[in-house]
Image (tube, rainbow, N blue to C red):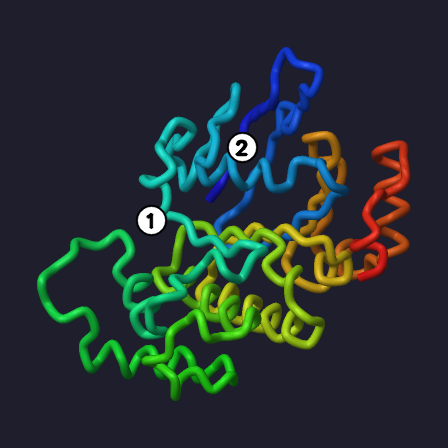
Amino acid sequence: MLELINVTKTFHKGSIDEKIALNQLNFTLRDGEFVTVIGSNGAGKSTMQNAICGSWLPDSGKILLDGTDITLLPEHRRAKYLGRVYQDPMMGTAANMQIEENLALAARRGKKKSLLPLIRKGEREQYVKLLSRLGLGLENRLSAKVGTLSGGQRQALTLLMATMQHPNLLLLDEHTAALDPKTAAKVMELTESLVHENNISTLMITHNMKDAIRYGDRLIMLHAGKIILDVSGEEKKNLTVPDLLAKFSEAAGEEFAGDKAILS
């Protein structure tokens, strides 16, 4: 579903602040695969996702999505193929619009617009079913403004919106980092359900090593813009956090510098 071939990206090239964010990165994600991504700060995790989204173009290399070269495709033209949930719960929804209006916009993404009423009865019934599975009571608040919701409620709603059209690829950028532990666990359970039920190819960045081990089919670790660890199957299932830290030290030649990851 996704292939990165020798992708490089350098920021502030030629200056004292020059930073190689991606260093001839090679990565393949198979159709329907759920991959978790970890790495210390500055390892290139978010840069990799932003390159896939088209937030900035790579200096060299290729990015293929479902066999199509999207390396130079503008960000807005890639959007209909991608679902994305950010770390900040405020970024995935329109605060001044109602819950049902947000869902309607997500349902129409990539489709031709019409002059018909925005939300029809059948759609509203579908939204009630979708929201009911969250267990947050939002199915009874369809007309509520999204800005009145808590961060966890907005993130759960964003996740629903990102997966409604069954995107080719779902990108999750530390989407539970800003939530309290109980809400984060609920959002992760929802994530796993939606991904597996709809067989969505997924790339999830996380600082939580326990989540990286528990969820997904495969785990990759980035360091200095390259993949230094790639595990799946029984090897991944049997990992522990100390194992992961030891593997990082062995592969990178240094200790993992990430308090959030260790504390989590």
How crowded is the residue under tag 2: few (<14 C-alpha within 10 Å), some, or many (20+)? many
Q: Is residue 151 left or right of residue 38?
A: left
Q: Mark 2, mark 1: which one is toward the viewer?
A: 1
Residue at the disc numbered 2: 4
Q: Position of residue 82 (x, y in %)?
A: 41, 49
Write down the quadrant of residue 165 in the picture.
bottom left
Q: Secondary structure at mark 1?
A: helix
* Residue 230: image tag: none
Nearer to us in this view, 103 or 247: 103
Q: Amino acid at mark 2?
A: Leu
Q: CA distance from mark 2 to mark 1?
A: 19 Å
Task: Classify 190 as above or below 6.
Answer: below
Q: Amino acid at mark 1?
A: Lys
Q: Quadrant of the C terminus?
A: bottom right
* Residue 80: image tag: 1
Write down the quadrant of residue 214 in the picture.
bottom right
Q: Which residue is farthest top?
A: 14
Q: Position of residue 2 (x, y in %)?
A: 49, 41
Q: Position of residue 243 (x, y in %)?
A: 88, 52
Mark 2 / mark 1, whichever is N-terminal: 2
Nearer to us in this view, 211 or 207: 207
| Residue at left offset 29%, top offset 64% | 107
Q: Secondary structure at mark 2?
A: strand
| Residue at left offset 40%, top offset 65% | 95
